[in-house]
Image (cartoon, grey):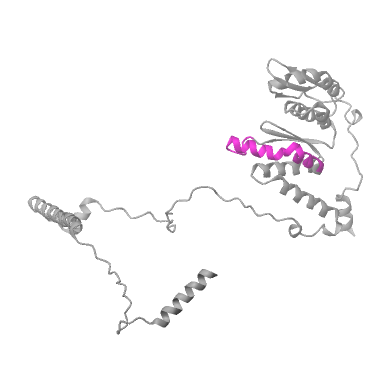
Amino acid sequence: MLQDKEDDRLTVPDGWKESPFTREDNPKGLLAESSFSVLFPKYRESYLSKVWPLVKELLSDHGIEPELDLIKGSLTVKTTRKAFDPFMIIKARDLITLLARSVDLEQAKRILEDDVACDVIKIGSMVAKKDRFVKRRKRLIGPGGTTLKAMECLTDCYVAVQGNTVAALGPHRGLKEVRKIVEDCMNNIHPFFTIRTIMEKHDLAKNPDMKYQNWEPYLPQYKSKNISKRKQPLKKKKKNAYTPFPPPQPESKIDKELASGEYFLKEDERRQRKTELKKQKQTQSKQDRQKKRDRAFIAPEESVQLVKKKAKKDESGKVDLRKLKAKFKDRKKMKSS
Protein backbone atom coordinates (compact mmCIF):
# COMPACT_ATOMS: atom_id res chain seq x y z
CA MET A 1 0.00 0.00 0.00
CA LEU A 2 2.85 2.40 0.84
CA GLN A 3 4.45 1.80 -2.54
CA ASP A 4 1.15 2.55 -4.33
CA LYS A 5 0.82 5.83 -2.41
CA GLU A 6 4.35 6.89 -3.36
CA ASP A 7 3.64 6.11 -7.05
CA ASP A 8 0.47 8.24 -6.87
CA ARG A 9 2.47 11.16 -5.51
CA LEU A 10 5.06 10.94 -8.30
CA THR A 11 2.55 10.81 -11.17
CA VAL A 12 1.04 14.09 -12.41
CA PRO A 13 -2.77 13.97 -12.70
CA ASP A 14 -4.38 14.64 -16.07
CA GLY A 15 -5.40 18.22 -16.74
CA TRP A 16 -3.27 19.60 -13.90
CA LYS A 17 -1.64 22.97 -14.55
CA GLU A 18 0.71 24.97 -12.36
CA SER A 19 -0.61 28.28 -11.10
CA PRO A 20 1.08 31.36 -12.62
CA PHE A 21 3.75 33.29 -10.70
CA THR A 22 2.27 36.63 -9.49
CA ARG A 23 3.55 39.69 -7.65
CA GLU A 24 2.05 38.36 -4.40
CA ASP A 25 4.50 35.42 -4.51
CA ASN A 26 7.48 37.84 -4.46
CA PRO A 27 6.30 41.24 -3.10
CA LYS A 28 9.83 42.56 -2.29
CA GLY A 29 11.16 42.12 -5.85
CA LEU A 30 14.67 41.19 -6.94
CA LEU A 31 17.88 42.01 -5.08
CA ALA A 32 20.25 42.61 -8.03
CA GLU A 33 20.00 43.70 -11.66
CA SER A 34 20.46 41.12 -14.43
CA SER A 35 20.97 41.83 -18.14
CA PHE A 36 21.50 39.93 -21.40
CA SER A 37 22.42 41.16 -24.88
CA VAL A 38 22.24 39.50 -28.30
CA LEU A 39 23.60 40.62 -31.68
CA PHE A 40 21.30 40.65 -34.72
CA PRO A 41 22.07 40.72 -38.50
CA LYS A 42 21.66 43.90 -40.49
CA TYR A 43 18.71 42.66 -42.59
CA ARG A 44 16.61 42.42 -39.38
CA GLU A 45 17.14 46.10 -38.55
CA SER A 46 14.05 47.44 -40.38
CA TYR A 47 11.70 44.80 -38.91
CA LEU A 48 12.98 45.22 -35.34
CA SER A 49 12.67 49.01 -35.46
CA LYS A 50 8.98 48.65 -36.47
CA VAL A 51 8.15 46.01 -33.86
CA TRP A 52 10.19 47.43 -30.94
CA PRO A 53 7.32 49.48 -29.37
CA LEU A 54 5.27 46.26 -29.09
CA VAL A 55 8.24 44.47 -27.48
CA LYS A 56 8.47 47.25 -24.88
CA GLU A 57 4.76 46.88 -24.05
CA LEU A 58 5.11 43.11 -23.61
CA LEU A 59 8.11 43.27 -21.28
CA SER A 60 7.07 46.35 -19.30
CA ASP A 61 4.26 44.33 -17.64
CA HIS A 62 6.93 42.01 -16.17
CA GLY A 63 9.27 44.82 -15.03
CA ILE A 64 11.92 44.27 -17.77
CA GLU A 65 13.38 47.06 -19.87
CA PRO A 66 14.48 46.25 -23.47
CA GLU A 67 17.01 48.32 -25.47
CA LEU A 68 17.65 48.41 -29.22
CA ASP A 69 21.09 49.63 -30.36
CA LEU A 70 21.14 50.07 -34.14
CA ILE A 71 24.75 51.33 -34.18
CA LYS A 72 26.22 48.23 -32.47
CA GLY A 73 23.51 45.92 -33.82
CA SER A 74 22.52 44.48 -30.45
CA LEU A 75 19.38 43.79 -28.41
CA THR A 76 19.56 44.10 -24.61
CA VAL A 77 17.13 43.23 -21.81
CA LYS A 78 17.62 44.07 -18.13
CA THR A 79 15.56 43.89 -14.96
CA THR A 80 14.15 46.94 -13.15
CA ARG A 81 12.91 47.51 -9.59
CA LYS A 82 9.39 46.60 -10.71
CA ALA A 83 10.47 43.05 -11.70
CA PHE A 84 9.14 40.32 -9.41
CA ASP A 85 9.59 37.07 -11.42
CA PRO A 86 13.26 35.95 -11.34
CA PHE A 87 12.84 33.62 -14.32
CA MET A 88 11.27 36.23 -16.60
CA ILE A 89 14.69 37.68 -17.51
CA ILE A 90 15.59 34.26 -19.00
CA LYS A 91 12.34 34.31 -20.97
CA ALA A 92 13.15 37.83 -22.19
CA ARG A 93 16.62 36.68 -23.27
CA ASP A 94 15.01 33.87 -25.31
CA LEU A 95 12.59 36.39 -26.83
CA ILE A 96 15.35 38.65 -28.20
CA THR A 97 17.29 35.56 -29.39
CA LEU A 98 14.28 34.41 -31.43
CA LEU A 99 13.74 37.90 -32.84
CA ALA A 100 17.39 38.00 -33.92
CA ARG A 101 16.99 34.59 -35.63
CA SER A 102 14.19 35.79 -37.98
CA VAL A 103 11.21 34.63 -35.89
CA ASP A 104 8.17 36.92 -36.08
CA LEU A 105 6.96 38.67 -32.93
CA GLU A 106 3.54 36.93 -33.17
CA GLN A 107 5.28 33.59 -32.61
CA ALA A 108 8.19 34.79 -30.45
CA LYS A 109 5.96 36.34 -27.76
CA ARG A 110 4.67 32.84 -26.90
CA ILE A 111 7.99 32.24 -25.12
CA LEU A 112 6.76 34.37 -22.22
CA GLU A 113 4.24 31.62 -21.35
CA ASP A 114 5.22 29.08 -18.67
CA ASP A 115 4.69 25.91 -20.73
CA VAL A 116 6.62 27.14 -23.79
CA ALA A 117 10.40 26.93 -24.31
CA CYS A 118 12.74 27.50 -27.26
CA ASP A 119 15.77 25.84 -28.80
CA VAL A 120 18.21 27.29 -31.34
CA ILE A 121 19.99 24.43 -33.17
CA LYS A 122 23.28 25.34 -34.87
CA ILE A 123 23.49 23.29 -38.08
CA GLY A 124 26.32 25.19 -39.82
CA SER A 125 29.12 23.06 -38.35
CA MET A 126 27.36 19.68 -38.78
CA VAL A 127 28.27 19.32 -42.48
CA ALA A 128 31.75 20.06 -43.86
CA LYS A 129 30.98 20.85 -47.53
CA LYS A 130 28.80 23.87 -48.31
CA ASP A 131 26.92 22.41 -51.30
CA ARG A 132 26.07 19.30 -49.28
CA PHE A 133 24.90 21.49 -46.38
CA VAL A 134 22.57 23.48 -48.69
CA LYS A 135 21.03 20.26 -50.07
CA ARG A 136 20.37 18.82 -46.62
CA ARG A 137 18.90 22.09 -45.36
CA LYS A 138 16.61 22.12 -48.41
CA ARG A 139 15.63 18.52 -47.62
CA LEU A 140 14.72 19.62 -44.07
CA ILE A 141 12.32 22.26 -45.43
CA GLY A 142 10.87 19.96 -48.11
CA PRO A 143 9.10 20.83 -51.38
CA GLY A 144 6.93 23.87 -50.65
CA GLY A 145 7.70 23.58 -46.93
CA THR A 146 5.75 20.30 -46.57
CA THR A 147 8.36 18.59 -44.36
CA LEU A 148 8.49 21.64 -42.08
CA LYS A 149 4.67 21.68 -41.77
CA ALA A 150 4.61 17.95 -40.97
CA MET A 151 7.25 18.51 -38.29
CA GLU A 152 5.23 21.36 -36.74
CA CYS A 153 1.99 19.31 -36.71
CA LEU A 154 3.72 16.31 -35.14
CA THR A 155 5.67 18.13 -32.41
CA ASP A 156 3.30 21.11 -31.72
CA CYS A 157 6.27 23.44 -32.24
CA TYR A 158 6.94 26.41 -34.48
CA VAL A 159 10.10 25.80 -36.53
CA ALA A 160 12.02 28.47 -38.49
CA VAL A 161 15.03 27.60 -40.67
CA GLN A 162 17.28 30.61 -41.28
CA GLY A 163 20.92 30.59 -42.36
CA ASN A 164 23.04 28.30 -40.20
CA THR A 165 20.45 27.84 -37.43
CA VAL A 166 17.04 26.25 -36.84
CA ALA A 167 14.88 28.01 -34.24
CA ALA A 168 12.15 25.94 -32.55
CA LEU A 169 9.44 27.18 -30.19
CA GLY A 170 7.05 24.94 -28.25
CA PRO A 171 6.77 22.39 -25.40
CA HIS A 172 9.86 20.65 -24.07
CA ARG A 173 8.92 17.24 -25.45
CA GLY A 174 8.35 18.68 -28.91
CA LEU A 175 11.69 20.52 -28.85
CA LYS A 176 13.48 17.24 -28.13
CA GLU A 177 11.80 15.62 -31.15
CA VAL A 178 12.59 18.60 -33.40
CA ARG A 179 16.28 18.43 -32.45
CA LYS A 180 16.30 14.69 -33.21
CA ILE A 181 14.80 15.26 -36.70
CA VAL A 182 17.19 18.12 -37.52
CA GLU A 183 20.35 16.31 -36.36
CA ASP A 184 19.38 13.13 -38.25
CA CYS A 185 18.72 15.16 -41.41
CA MET A 186 22.14 16.80 -41.17
CA ASN A 187 23.67 13.32 -40.67
CA ASN A 188 22.15 12.17 -44.01
CA ILE A 189 19.03 10.45 -42.62
CA HIS A 190 15.87 11.59 -44.41
CA PRO A 191 13.33 13.39 -42.16
CA PHE A 192 10.59 11.04 -43.39
CA PHE A 193 12.12 8.11 -41.51
CA THR A 194 12.51 10.03 -38.22
CA ILE A 195 8.99 11.52 -38.47
CA ARG A 196 7.48 8.09 -39.07
CA THR A 197 9.33 6.62 -36.07
CA ILE A 198 8.07 9.45 -33.82
CA MET A 199 4.50 8.91 -35.06
CA GLU A 200 4.75 5.22 -34.12
CA LYS A 201 6.03 6.18 -30.66
CA HIS A 202 3.07 8.54 -30.17
CA ASP A 203 0.63 5.76 -31.09
CA LEU A 204 2.33 3.33 -28.70
CA ALA A 205 2.27 5.91 -25.88
CA LYS A 206 -1.52 6.16 -26.16
CA ASN A 207 -1.88 2.43 -25.46
CA PRO A 208 -1.68 1.78 -21.66
CA ASP A 209 -0.80 -1.92 -22.22
CA MET A 210 2.47 -0.91 -23.92
CA LYS A 211 3.67 1.25 -21.03
CA TYR A 212 6.15 -1.29 -19.56
CA GLN A 213 7.01 -3.17 -22.77
CA ASN A 214 9.90 -2.87 -25.20
CA TRP A 215 8.93 -0.76 -28.23
CA GLU A 216 11.82 -1.76 -30.49
CA PRO A 217 9.97 -4.61 -32.31
CA TYR A 218 7.07 -2.24 -33.14
CA LEU A 219 9.23 0.60 -34.52
CA PRO A 220 10.19 0.66 -38.23
CA GLN A 221 13.74 -0.47 -38.99
CA TYR A 222 15.63 1.23 -41.83
CA LYS A 223 18.85 0.11 -43.45
CA SER A 224 21.13 2.65 -45.11
CA LYS A 225 21.62 1.95 -48.84
CA ASN A 226 24.38 4.48 -49.34
CA ILE A 227 27.33 2.98 -51.17
CA SER A 228 30.70 4.65 -50.76
CA LYS A 229 31.77 6.27 -54.04
CA ARG A 230 35.38 6.55 -52.94
CA LYS A 231 37.80 4.84 -55.30
CA GLN A 232 39.30 1.72 -53.77
CA PRO A 233 42.99 0.93 -54.40
CA LEU A 234 43.85 -2.11 -56.52
CA LYS A 235 46.35 -3.43 -53.99
CA LYS A 236 45.35 -3.06 -50.39
CA LYS A 237 48.03 -3.28 -47.75
CA LYS A 238 47.29 -5.78 -45.03
CA LYS A 239 47.97 -4.56 -41.55
CA ASN A 240 50.17 -6.78 -39.46
CA ALA A 241 49.07 -8.03 -36.07
CA TYR A 242 49.67 -5.53 -33.29
CA THR A 243 52.69 -6.23 -31.07
CA PRO A 244 53.79 -4.09 -28.14
CA PHE A 245 57.47 -4.60 -29.02
CA PRO A 246 59.25 -2.28 -31.47
CA PRO A 247 60.47 -3.66 -34.85
CA PRO A 248 64.04 -5.09 -34.99
CA GLN A 249 66.79 -2.60 -35.74
CA PRO A 250 68.09 -2.85 -39.35
CA GLU A 251 71.62 -4.12 -39.86
CA SER A 252 74.32 -1.53 -40.43
CA LYS A 253 77.02 -1.71 -43.12
CA ILE A 254 79.60 -2.96 -40.60
CA ASP A 255 77.24 -5.73 -39.41
CA LYS A 256 76.77 -6.94 -43.00
CA GLU A 257 80.56 -6.92 -43.59
CA LEU A 258 81.12 -8.87 -40.39
CA ALA A 259 78.53 -11.47 -41.42
CA SER A 260 80.09 -11.95 -44.90
CA GLY A 261 83.68 -11.81 -43.60
CA GLU A 262 84.56 -8.81 -45.77
CA TYR A 263 85.35 -6.73 -42.71
CA PHE A 264 88.53 -8.72 -42.04
CA LEU A 265 89.85 -8.41 -45.62
CA LYS A 266 92.54 -5.97 -46.64
CA GLU A 267 91.82 -2.94 -48.82
CA ASP A 268 93.34 -4.50 -51.95
CA GLU A 269 91.35 -7.70 -51.47
CA ARG A 270 88.13 -5.71 -51.08
CA ARG A 271 88.76 -3.84 -54.34
CA GLN A 272 89.51 -7.07 -56.15
CA ARG A 273 86.30 -8.63 -54.82
CA LYS A 274 84.24 -5.62 -55.96
CA THR A 275 85.73 -5.72 -59.46
CA GLU A 276 84.97 -9.44 -59.75
CA LEU A 277 81.34 -8.89 -58.74
CA LYS A 278 81.06 -6.03 -61.24
CA LYS A 279 82.48 -8.21 -64.04
CA GLN A 280 80.01 -10.99 -63.22
CA LYS A 281 77.09 -8.57 -63.46
CA GLN A 282 78.40 -7.20 -66.76
CA THR A 283 78.75 -10.66 -68.32
CA GLN A 284 75.26 -11.60 -67.15
CA SER A 285 73.69 -8.45 -68.61
CA LYS A 286 75.67 -8.95 -71.85
CA GLN A 287 74.26 -12.47 -72.22
CA ASP A 288 70.71 -11.23 -71.62
CA ARG A 289 71.09 -8.53 -74.30
CA GLN A 290 72.48 -11.06 -76.79
CA LYS A 291 69.51 -13.37 -76.19
CA LYS A 292 67.08 -10.53 -76.95
CA ARG A 293 68.91 -9.79 -80.24
CA ASP A 294 68.93 -13.47 -81.28
CA ARG A 295 65.15 -13.72 -80.88
CA ALA A 296 64.68 -11.67 -84.07
CA PHE A 297 66.57 -14.30 -86.17
CA ILE A 298 64.65 -17.33 -84.93
CA ALA A 299 62.10 -18.53 -87.53
CA PRO A 300 58.51 -18.75 -86.31
CA GLU A 301 56.81 -22.12 -86.14
CA GLU A 302 54.71 -22.84 -89.23
CA SER A 303 51.14 -23.89 -88.69
CA VAL A 304 50.24 -27.25 -90.24
CA GLN A 305 47.53 -26.71 -92.84
CA LEU A 306 45.11 -29.51 -93.46
CA VAL A 307 44.94 -30.37 -97.13
CA LYS A 308 41.44 -31.04 -98.35
CA LYS A 309 41.03 -34.45 -99.81
CA LYS A 310 39.69 -34.52 -103.35
CA ALA A 311 36.71 -36.60 -104.12
CA LYS A 312 37.73 -39.92 -105.47
CA LYS A 313 36.53 -40.85 -108.92
CA ASP A 314 35.14 -44.19 -109.74
CA GLU A 315 37.74 -46.73 -110.77
CA SER A 316 35.96 -47.38 -114.06
CA GLY A 317 35.77 -43.68 -114.91
CA LYS A 318 32.25 -44.10 -116.37
CA VAL A 319 29.31 -41.77 -115.53
CA ASP A 320 26.19 -43.23 -113.85
CA LEU A 321 23.26 -42.22 -116.12
CA ARG A 322 20.54 -43.01 -113.58
CA LYS A 323 21.98 -40.67 -110.99
CA LEU A 324 22.48 -37.95 -113.60
CA LYS A 325 18.83 -38.19 -114.80
CA ALA A 326 17.52 -38.06 -111.23
CA LYS A 327 19.65 -34.95 -110.61
CA PHE A 328 18.22 -33.10 -113.62
CA LYS A 329 14.64 -34.05 -112.66
CA ASP A 330 15.16 -32.58 -109.20
CA ARG A 331 16.42 -29.28 -110.67
CA LYS A 332 13.37 -29.03 -113.00
CA LYS A 333 11.01 -29.55 -110.08
CA MET A 334 12.77 -26.79 -108.13
CA LYS A 335 12.45 -24.36 -111.05
CA SER A 336 8.78 -25.19 -111.70
CA SER A 337 7.90 -24.71 -108.04
Side of 99 where 184 appears, left or right: left
Q: Is residue 194 above or below residue 89?
A: below
Image quadrant where one finds the N terminus: bottom right
- Residue sitting at 25 percent across and 66 percent down? 302
Is the magenta region chiefly helix, strand or loop? helix
Extreme-top residue of the structure = 71
Question: How far from the left and from the top, in percent, is residue 117?
Answer: 79, 36
Q: Does residue 201 appear left or right of residue 134 in this picture?
A: right
Compared to 185, does 161 lie above or below?
above
Residue at the spot 90% in from the left edge and 28% down from the top edge: 23
268 relative to 307, above or below:
above
Residue furthest left in the image: 268
Q: Position of residue 127 (x, y in %)?
A: 61, 39
- 145 magenta-colored: yes
Q: Quadrant of residue 98?
A: top right
**Which residues fall within the magenta stretch?**
124-153
Q: Would you identify the image quadrant in which residue 68 lies?
A: top right
Q: Position of residue 55 (x, y in %)?
A: 82, 22
Q: Quadrant of residue 133?
A: top right
- Tell me which residue sits at (75%, 56%) in the image: 219
